[in-house]
Amino acid sequence: MRLKSILALLLVILLVGCGQADAPQLQSDTEIISIGEGETSFILTVTDREGAQTAYQVHTDCETVGKALVELKLIDGEPGPYGMYVKTVAGTTVDYNKDGKYWAFYHGDTYATSGVDATKISEGETYSFRVE
């Protein structure tokens, strides 16, 4: 039963993601918070339920976005059959089974085609999570 629920959730995520417009642009008044240490950096934008944005410039030596964000305690979740199922971003927990919402992961302006834990970091790229 649990596997069916997870597969149904992934199907919903894929279907919703395919029909999504571009991820929201960084609001001009959003302050960018610098976190972490390392040679590589990228921007992470978090958009909560109300549409409020928080932006981070993440510095890391990790190879994947997921590993960097877990180490910095910006995301948390549980293992799933397709990688990490992110439930908490920047201290805000969203659970599809409880409220019908989930954290959508974007690479640039498009819905990511790989999970956060499988997405290789590219210097200067922008990644984002938003509640959908």
Image (cartoon, grey):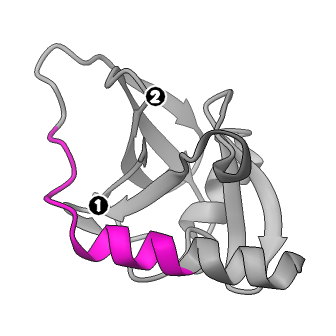
Q: Which amino acid does label 2 sit on?
A: Ser
Which badge, 1 or 2, is on the more N-terminal residue? 2
Please state, as top left, top right, bottom left or bottom right, where the N terminus lies in the image: bottom right
Q: Can you identify the residue that label 1 sits on?
A: 125
Q: Mark 1 packing: few (<14 Cα in 10 Å), some, or many (20+)? A: few
Quick check: 3 left or right of 84? Answer: right
- From the viewer's perspective, is residue 66 above or below residue 79? above
The residue under label 1 is which amino acid type? Glu
Image-quadrant location for residue 109: bottom left
Where on the picture, by quarter, is residue 131?
top left
Residue where numbered disc 2 is placed: 34
In magenta stretch: residue 108? no
67 to the left or right of 18: right
Residue at x 63%, y 39% (from the top left corner): 99
Asked if residue 101 can be seen in this view, the reply is: yes
Q: What stretch is highlighted in magenta?
A: 11-25
